[in-house]
Image (tube, rainbow, N blue to C red):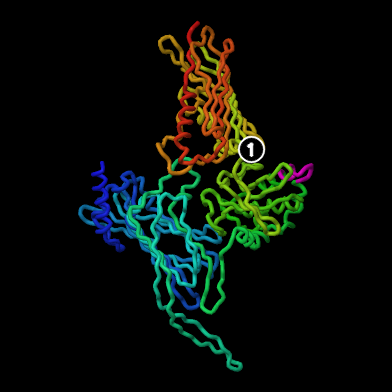
Amino acid sequence: MKFVFYIACVFTIHLTIAQDYKFGKVSKEELLETSDPTDPEANATVLYRSQEIKFEYIESKGFVQKNDIHERIKIYNKDGFDQATKVIKLYNESNELKESLTGFKAYTYNLEGNKIIDDKLKSDGIFEEETNKYWLTTKFTMPNIKEGCVIEYKYTIQSELIRLDDIEFQQEIPIRKLDLNIEIPEYYVYQKYLNTKAFYYPKLNESSKYKEFDFTYRLEQKAGERALSQKVENKQKVRLNIIEANETNIPALKNETHVSNIDNYRAIMKMDLSSIHYPDQVRRNFTTNWEKVTKTIYESNDFGEQLKKSGYFSDDLSSAIAGATNPIEQTYNIFNFVKTKVKWNGLHGYYADLGVRQSYKQGVGNVADINLILNAMLREAGLDANPVLVSTKDNGIPVFPTRSGFNYVICAVKLKEGLVLLDASRNFTSLNVLPVKALNWQGRLIRKDGSSDWINLSVQEPSKEIVSLNIKLNTDLSATGKVRNQYTDYSALKYRNTFESYSKDDLIKEIESENGLLQVSNIEVEDLNIPIKPVLLSYEYELKEALEEIGGSYYFSPLLFLKIKETPFKLQTRNYPIDLDYPTSRKYMVNIMLPEGFQVESLPENQKLQYNSTEGEFTYLIRENGSMLQMIITLDLNNTLILPENYEQFKQFFELLVNKQAEKIVLKKA
């Protein structure tokens, strides 16, 4: 085994040294390659990635950032075809603050016979769309994609912004060779942050050199009544601070089940501008803290100013709170009114897109439009309401104070019952029931004076699923009965989001699909569209061959078709924590009527299982009562974050409870 590994490493090193990575110089060896030597299961591999960031001085614009990207990717099979579609995001706020794409070219290479055929990406494979008023997206799909092909593209992002985008060292597929070179003029000072949660750390080399820049500008003067303009040229040597990385065989970032955001564990470097100091000018410091970040956001025309507007909803507010006798009722009524009045357009953001007046008038807006309207109406009603900045799970956890650390905003109302969190952008949210994507550690609450504090977004109370299962076992070995399910809070939200468009027939098919011998009838769903209430689901069923006869004894699983069939946690080891989103409590109350002429031969033993004391608990209680069997089975998961070092214990806990649910009750004829 060691010898095979040694051969693979030698082969990989040989490829790294010998390969020509100049654009267009794709080799037959690359096209003939059938798998990645270090990761044979990979569907594709980045053969080479180069990123070079430099600053050029342009008259009338000053320093302009140029970000050169070159990438060559080998696609081994059809599962790797998704690598042929790429997205480039460009900042596009205004003519003065924008990014542009230049020097774009892309080819697909295939081997036909002994000849390398290249297909150029044409304009009909490139699409641009305006994501919102701040971002422009360029999406392209490579032509003539086949198993075994190699794709290659390069482009330059020219930016008039001084900020630097995140530098990614890791992708969802392996990277065989990566070269990074960043050259920053001494006038700009950045703080570097490497992701401390990553499992791969690049080696960074820092140095400096001098480069001569030709600074050209116009000097405006007055001569009497005339204005004179004189072009001035000034050559000056500027120290460039250099950051380099030359990495080989970077492992893929492989996702695992129940990970909230795999990007939280990606090898990445963030560059935060801390100061600018031009010659003969005062240093401008940008080093900041969260208080300053939130104050800046609050003072924006698209945030704090929107909260001050109120005249557009005055009449509707009076109607919304009419008859409400206490603050919790007023909060609920205003919340429901906004959900009905303004629908979400699918865009995130903490800055208003259309503006609250236009969104209210048109009945549509982004998350900020909707929740800032909600906040303003609650305040106008005399309630203590404040916006809360949030980073959604797919945006990651901010590691340093920056406005880009947030991408969402909700609303918090302080009542005597405690702090109530609200998001009016989705149909089925409720009081303290937010979209799961917003349950990301902490949010930043901003008060009217612009001051702010962190608040906890983690769910404290368990969401419940209570199941009542009545079973009548029949002498023909079938079972009939009724099921009643009650879902609360986030369990109800999940049910509503999943089944909101299902008809009764669709629901029946969904339940029956778990067991081909099951027939469901008389299904009813109550309060599906009333988020403040639990969802109630009930139906009758008939299950053929519920009992299995073996050697004169009759076996059956007491939860029938409702039991957990297999554990969702099958990996032997984990690199990343399990995120269960919110605490849950599941309870089964089972009543079993034995067939006439049958009696119990053996019952499973009562048992209690625990994970890490009270963080997880499973109880199994069964007792015989004449011709009836009564069971209570509970599963409580109180800790929503399972660390990798606790995974083995948690995995074993789940395996034991699944096996326990699968244990059979044994009957015999009297």
Residue 220 showing in the rendered view: yes
Q: Nearer the viewer, residue 657 or 542?
A: 657
Q: The magenta stretch spans which residues?
A: 321-332
- For mark 1, give the secondary structure: loop
- Residue 297 within the segment the image draws in magenta: no
Q: Position of residue 638 (x, y in %)?
A: 57, 36
Q: Which residue is pictured at 67% across the width and 49% down the height?
A: 412
333 on left or right of 284: right
Work out which residue is located at the far left of the displayed protein and give it: 114
Q: Position of residue 81 (x, y in %)?
A: 36, 49
Q: Which residue is mark 1?
A: 529
In the image, residue 525 sits, relative to residue 46, either above or below, namely above
Work out which residue is located at the far top of the displayed protein and give it: 670
Q: Quadrant of the N terminus?
A: top left
Q: Position of residue 203 (x, y in %)?
A: 38, 58
In the image, residue 511 sits, relative to residue 241, either above or below, namely above
470 on left or right of 65: right
Tag 1: residue type?
A: Asn
Give the quarter of the image for residue 25.
bottom left
Q: Nearer the viewer, residue 609 or 334?
A: 609
Give the quarter of the image for residue 180.
bottom left
Work out which residue is located at the far front of the displayed protein and give it: 613
Q: Nearer the viewer, residue 574 or 69?
A: 574
Q: Position of residue 461 (x, y in %)?
A: 62, 37
